[in-house]
Amino acid sequence: MSVTQTVEIPANRRLTIDVPREVPAGQVILTFTPVTKTGMIDFKNASSNEVMSAGDEILDKHLAAFQALAK
């Protein structure tokens, strides 16, 4: 199981996270990935290669997270 949530980091760098009930208790890997303009893709104006590359990147991240959880 993988849960992705976009949050805003406040200036004081403190977060309180409520985890959905369907996430089992136990150890998890929590990863912070900054969202930047270069990390976003404008699908309306992007080339098919850009869209495919973005999709591959997303799948790679989800696969890595799944493999880490499976260990």
Image (cartoon, rainbow, N blue to C red):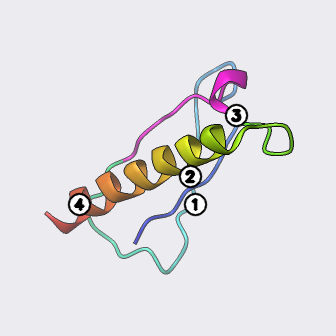
Residue 43, image quadrant: top right
Q: Which residue is mark 1?
A: 18
Residue reaching furthest to the top:
11
What is the CA distance from the residue labelled 1 to the residue labelled 4? 24 Å
- Inspect the magenta stretch and tell me whether residue 7 lies in it: no
**First in sequence: mark 1 vs mark 4:** 1
Q: Which residue is mark 4?
A: 67
* Cα separation between marks 1 and 2: 4 Å
C-alpha span from label 3 to label 2: 24 Å
Give the magenta-colored segment's residue range. Answer: 30-40
For the point 86% across and 44% down, the residue is: 44
Q: Is residue 27 left or right of residue 40?
A: left
Mark 3 or mark 2: whose residue is earlier in sequence:
2
Residue behind mark 3: 40
Amino acid of disc 3: Met
Foreground residue, 6 or 63? 63
- Please name which of the two marks, 3 or 4, marks the residue nearer to the observer: 3
Q: Say whether disc 3 or disc 4 marks the residue closer to the N-terminus.
A: 3
Q: Can you name the residue that lies furthest to the front here?
A: 48
Quarter of the picture holding the C terminus? bottom left
- How far across and down, in percent of the image, does residue 36 sit? 67, 24
